[in-house]
Amino acid sequence: MLKIIETNIPSATNQRLLSLLKTEAKWSFGHDKDIETDPNRDAGLTFNPYNEGGLVVDENGQLLDRTQIITAYGFFIYDMITSKLDQKFSSLYRMLFNIYFRGISESKFHLDLESHDCWTFIYGLNSNDGGLELKINDETKFIKSIESQAIVFPSHLYHRGVTPKTEAKRYSLAFVTKI
């Protein structure tokens, strides 16, 4: 049900991707459906370069070359994760980059999809003391964010991103994929 995947993707690859994300991505505030309205907290930032059916374009219908490069990195990471799993997947449903800021960002428990034929992968772009909390059999399990490691679980499990307590930011890449 829950798997931890060591992708062995070099740190230099993650650093190149982070550099592009910092300068080229069109970030927006993340949101949870039931998040309280607290002016001192947010759900972090999110960048969504891919949804089922194609790449996400800007308000003018344009896709920047740098966005294509970011998306290509994302697909490379997705392929590395899936190559290490016994399960075969039919299609990628969503790719979403996230940033959580220490002391500001807070995520609520949510599920990505209610479907039992979808899986979520959370890939750590940097190591930090934040991570992921999952609700499994009425227990909450915390998994620390480790660079180049992916946490794989069914998309119908409740989970949330956890903000780091000592590092400034937690960067992650989330995939939802179909069996």
Image (cartoon, grey):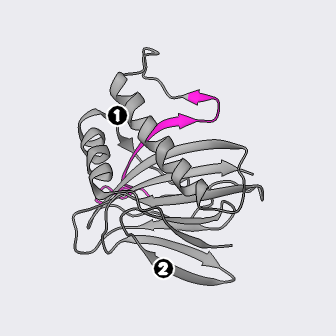
The amino acid sitting under disc 2 is Phe
Q: What residue is drawn where x is 50% and y is 53%? A: 174
Q: Nearer the viewer, residue 74 or 119?
A: 74
* Residue at mark 1: 26
On the rendered image, what quadrant is the N terminus found in?
bottom right
- Membership of 51 in magenta stretch: yes
Q: Taking 161 as reference, is 125 left or right?
A: left
Residue 20 spot, x, y in % from top left: 28, 39
> Seen from this angle, which residue lies furthest bottom?
139
On screen, residue 133 above or below 34: below
Q: Which residue is at the front of the view, 122 or 103?
A: 122
- Of the residues under marks 2 and 1, which one precedes in the sequence? 1
Q: Position of residue 2 (x, y in %)?
A: 63, 73
Q: At label 1, which amino acid type do we have?
A: Lys
Residue span colored magenta = 36-54
Q: Is residue 49 left or right of residue 44?
A: right
Q: Label 2 neighbourhood size at 10 Å, few (<14), some (14-19), many (20+)?
A: some
Q: Residue furthest right?
A: 116
Residue picked out by circle 2: 142
